[in-house]
Amino acid sequence: MRKLFSISWVKSKQPRKQRKYRYNAPKHIRQKFMHANLSKELRKKYNIRSLLLRKGDKVKVMRGKFKGKISKVSKVDLKKLVVYLEDVKRKKVDGREVQIPIQPSNLQIVSAEFDDKKRAKILERKSKEQIKKEK
């Protein structure tokens, strides 16, 4: 019987097993793929490099057709491992505008919302870990 998911796949160098790991990963591991780097100002302020993307975060597109565009995150799709932005749209033949999916690795967080207690706690924990690593 084939396994649905195994942590050992991540150790492999084979591209097919890396793709298999990402495709078959459960939600708690998929969530780790949804991190994006912080801007230089936020890095200095919070002492962390990356943060989980959330709806409402302001991000800058770093790669692709929309490079340099700053927009708000409108939807985070864990199943497809992509993010949709408010101002990044394409016009279809019938005239409708649809949002374009963008991978989180191609984004940089410019400003994040820390109204949520849970997110503030995560930020506090991560910054403490970072300070310990520096020592």
Image (spheres, rainbow, N blue to C red):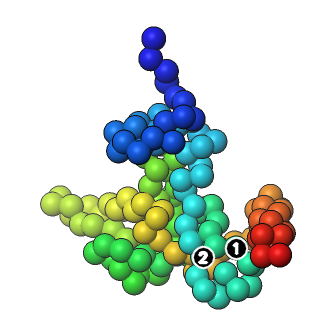
Q: Are marks 2 and 1 in contact (CB under 8 Å)?
A: yes
**Residue 44 picture location, percent across and down:** 70, 86
Q: Name which residue lies at 80% across and 58% down.
A: 118
Indicate the position of residue 121 as horizontal and vertical percent values: 83, 62
Q: In terms of secondary structure, where does tag 2 sit?
A: strand
**Where on the picture, by quarter, is residue 134?**
bottom right
| Whether residue 23 is visible | no
Which quarter of the rendering shows the C terminus? bottom right
Q: Position of residue 103 (x, y in %)?
A: 42, 60
Q: Which residue is mark 2?
A: 38
Of marks 2 and 1, which one's residue comes earlier in the chain?
A: 2
The quarter of the picture where the N terminus appears is: top left
Of residue 49 and residue 12, the one placed in the foreground of this image is 12
Please say if 63 is above or below 51.
below
The residue at which mark 1 appears reads as 48
* x then y, percent, for residue 128: 84, 69
Pointer 1 local density, CA inside 10 Å: few below 14, some 14–19, many at least 20: some
Q: Residue furthest left?
A: 93
Residue at the image point whose x is 38% and y is 59% from the top: 101
User: CA separation, marks 2 and 1?
Assistant: 8 Å
Horizontal arrangement in the rendering, residue 44 relative to residue 106 (left or right): right
Residue 59 appears left or right of 99? right
**Of labels 2 and 1, the one closer to you:** 1
Camera-nearest residue between 114 and 74: 114
- Residue 98 in which image quadrant: bottom left
Callout 2, which amino acid? Leu
Q: Residue at x 36, y 42 (%)?
A: 14
Q: Is residue 67 above or below residue 79?
A: below
Task: Identify the image quadrant of residue 2.
Answer: top left
